[in-house]
Image: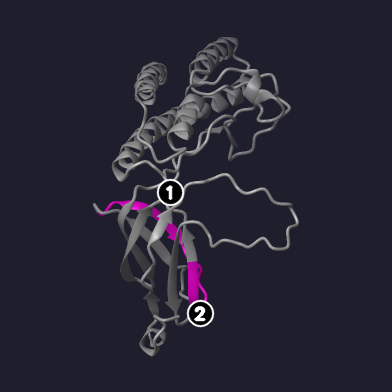
Amino acid sequence: IQQLTSEVMASASHLFVPRAAYRFRTITSPSTTYDDPTTGEDPQYGASINYYLKAPAATPPKITILDAQGRTVRTLTGTNVAGINRIAWDLRDEPGAETRLLTSPMYAPHIAVGPEGRVAPGTGRMSVLVAPGMYTVQLSVGGVVSSRSLEVRKDPNTAGSVADIAEQVRLLEALRVEMNAGAAAVGRIEQVRVQLEALGRTTTDAEVRRAATALGAKLVDLEMNLVDLRQTGTGQDGVRFGSKLLAKLGYLGNGLSGGDFKPTDQQVEVQGILKEQMRTHLTMIESVLGT
């Protein structure tokens, strides 16, 4: 409100100076009853980005977050109403690739899969909580770009240092590279497998059917190194079978991101082991799909 001058209200769009944002870490919530009438509501987590529009734009405003090196960290779509608009950036970068399956779970053909596929059970998309530092907020409205600086501050109640957090972020980003590569490999295999299944239903050529079945079995074996194709995503599937490589990478990422500390020696070692395993599996998959 203090920044909302008559000059601002006369302009087509205006990006307000944002307050510094703290990357607070989760603590144990105090015990309270579910219907406590005295419970308050905190602001949305992260950075509050406020801007003014004299009138709704032809297309929704775009908010881009850049790091100190000018690299895009996150792109958000803002609200588009006349007056003051506010959106919250959760201080995370763009989520990684999603691992999707185009085929039904093994031994569960009754679970139909639509054209968009299904998320592979046991996998997730990694979005890294950015390190403390200076960032740039860009508002793009109708071809006009406005910029403001935004400071992201460390949680003052955590014991890890800014340098510790930077090391953690670097390892998380390296993990995401492997997870994205694995998701892409699963996607390639699934595209072939769904075509093989269609071929098996349409051709009567015995030799073609045998070749398709053999190739399909080989692809299943390779894909099972990355994701568990037996999981339906329901019931006790998650504890019935051992974790595959993409699930292990995600589990390591969850452990790494649980606090403001640098990676342990063990976490660094496991990351190297899983990276080598991913390289081996990708080489095997390329050998089959490439020939």
Q: Determine the CA span between mark 2 and mark 1.
A: 39 Å
Coordinates of residue 118 in the picture (x, y in percent): 60, 36
Coordinates of residue 66 in the picture (x, y in percent): 31, 56
Coordinates of residue 54 in the picture (x, y in percent): 45, 82
Residue at the right extreme, as displayed: 35
**Can residue 201 be seen at all in this image of the molecule?**
no
Q: Viewer-proximal residue, 91 or 111?
A: 91
Residue at the spot x=40%, y=59% of the render? Answer: 21
Q: Quadrant of residue 164?
A: top left
Q: Viewer-proximal residue, 138 or 281?
A: 138
Mark 2: secondary structure: loop
Q: Quadrant of residue 2?
A: bottom left
**Can residue 111 be seen at all in this image of the molecule?**
yes
Residue at the spot x=67%, y=48% of the render? Answer: 31
Q: Callout 1, which amino acid? A: Asn
Residue at the spot x=28%, y=51% of the render? Answer: 71
The magenta span reads: 70-86
Q: Callout 2, which amino acid? A: Ala
> Is 81 situated above or below 215?
below
Of the two numbered discs 2 and 1 on the same chain, state the one appearing first in sequence: 2
Which tag is nearer the camera, tag 2 or tag 1?
1
Q: Is residue 73 magenta?
A: yes
Image quadrant occupied by the N terminus: bottom left
Coordinates of residue 268 in the picture (x, y in percent): 35, 25
Mark 1: secondary structure: loop
* Location of mark 2 (residue): 82
The colour scheme of the drawn protein is one colour
Q: Is residue 192 magenta?
A: no
Q: Residues within 10 Å of mark 1 (few under 14, many from 20)?
A: few
On screen, residue 175 versus residue 248, left or right, reads left
> Is 120 situated above or below 28?
above
* Location of mark 1 (residue): 157
